[in-house]
Image (spheres, rainbow, N blue to C red):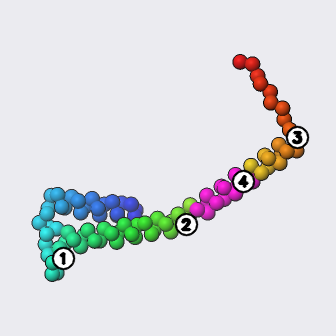
Amino acid sequence: MALLISVGGFLLLVLLSGFAPGVLNQEMFGHVTVGLAGGIGQFAVMALTAWRYTVHMERRIDPAVDRLRAEIARDEAEQARVQQARGPQQRRFGSW
């Protein structure tokens, strides 16, 4: 959803600048136009999107990655222990 809002807002601003420049040239107050406010607003929207993405990753994805890494480390430790218990293995080269 955040992706649609941020990309949609950017696309709307680009399309308005290309096809309806009169809308973006309307003064809001002083020398600030709709286009300038929209461009500055894009920075706020992108900052909000990046912040929400970071929060989502920290809450949902990072814990899952940490669990997977711990599981892989346990599996590798178990394999190393089994290999060590078997003793040194000799290499066997098969024929083609």
Q: Are marks 1 and 4 in contact (CB under 8 Å)?
A: no
Which amino acid, mark 4? Ala
Task: Answer whether residue 66 is magenta in the image.
Answer: yes
Pointers 1 and 3 in contact (C-beta within 8 Å): no
Q: CA distance from mark 1 to mark 3?
A: 77 Å
Q: Nearer the viewer, residue 81 or 57?
A: 81
Q: Which residue is mark 3?
A: 87
Which label belongs to residue 73? 4
Between the C-alphas of marks 3 and 2, the distance is 43 Å
- Sequence-first tag of 1 and 3: 1
In the picture provided, is 30 more to the left or to the right than 54? left
| Residue picked out by circle 2 | 58
Location of residue 86 in the rendering, given as x and y in whole percent from the top left corner: 87, 40
Q: Of 9 and 83, which appears nearest the observer?
A: 83
Q: Estimate the spatial distance between the alpha carbons at disc 4 and disc 2, rounded to whole Å.
A: 21 Å
Q: Quadrant of the C terminus?
A: top right
- Point 40% across, 66% down: residue: 49
Q: Are marks 3 and 2 in contact (CB under 8 Å)?
A: no
Question: Which residue is labeled 1 in the image?
Answer: 32
Q: Secondary structure at mark 4?
A: helix
Q: Is residue 93 above or below residue 10?
A: above
Magenta stretch in the rendered image: 62-75
